[in-house]
Image: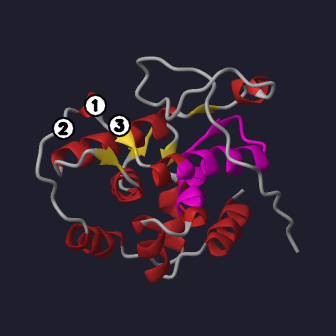
């Protein structure tokens, strides 16, 4: 039986022009814990794709649905490090990623006003997903936060559109963790 530590969400301690900073606060006594974990290049690309997707759909914020769409797109890419672990997990669990994309397209309404990508913030649920992804990376003792951590964060958030779609396709945090452990 595996034991997973549930960590409280954290807020990144810095602000700046970096589009990957999801929240700002005064430095905390735990800020040194955040220094060791950065987002992988692959995850940064996924977050950038999520911003583009939100802008394309004329949404005012990046939500969990945009994160999932970008994760699905990334699952089809092969980079210098091979395939995305999140994509491998989805494949092993028998997810039809094209069908999931269609379901997301049918679920997500188009916005009314265009918003510049650099003006898009994250919804509270998307922020929670990123915080949960960081917590998952810490539990796994990873050196960077990557796509598999984002997938687990999406599943753990539970109330977002992405979590509901993933659950509808039979993907749970427990199944994803089991496959990640098997792949390690």
Vertical arrangement, residue 122 with respect to residue 168, above or below:
above
Whole-percent x, y for residue 15 in the image: 51, 20
Q: Which residues are magenta?
A: 128-154
At 61% from the left edge and 40% from the top edge, which residue is drawn? 145
Vertical arrangement, residue 173 with respect to residue 127, above or below:
below
Q: CA distance from mark 1 to mark 3?
A: 13 Å
Helix, strand or loop for disc 2: loop
Residue ID for mark 1? 119
Q: Is residue 8 magenta?
A: no
Q: CA distance from mark 2 to mark 3?
A: 15 Å
> Marks 2 and 1: CB-CB under 8 Å?
yes
Who comes first in sequence, dot 2 or dot 3?
3
Residue ID for mark 2? 115
At 88% from the left edge and 74% from the top edge, which residue is drawn? 1
For this orientation, the residue located farthest to the top is 16
Quarter of the image for residue 180 reads bottom right
Helix, strand or loop for disc 1: helix
**How did the renderer colour the structure?**
secondary structure
């Amino acid at each position: 039986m595996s034991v997973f530590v549930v960590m409280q969400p954290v807020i990144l301690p810095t602000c700046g022009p970096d589009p990957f900073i999801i929240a700002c606060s005064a430095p905390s006594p735990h800020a040194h814990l955040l220094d060791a974990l950065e987002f992988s290049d692959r995850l940064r690309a996924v977050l950038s794709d999520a911003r583009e997707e939100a802008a394309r759909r004329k949404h005012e914020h990046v939500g969990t649905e945009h994160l999932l769409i970008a994760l699905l797109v990334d699952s089809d890419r092969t980079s210098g490090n091979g395939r995305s672990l999140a994509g491998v997990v989805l494949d092993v669990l028998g997810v039809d990623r094209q069908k999931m994309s269609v379901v997301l397209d049918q679920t997500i309404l188009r916005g009314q006003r265009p918003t510049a990508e650099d003006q898009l913030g994250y919804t509270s649920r998307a922020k929670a997903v990123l915080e949960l992804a960081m917590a998952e990376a810490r539990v796994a003792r990873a050196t960077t936060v990557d796509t598999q951590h984002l997938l687990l964060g999406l599943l753990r958030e539970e109330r977002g559109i992405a979590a509901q779609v993933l659950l509808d396709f039979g993907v749970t945090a427990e199944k994803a963790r089991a496959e990640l452990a098997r792949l390690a």
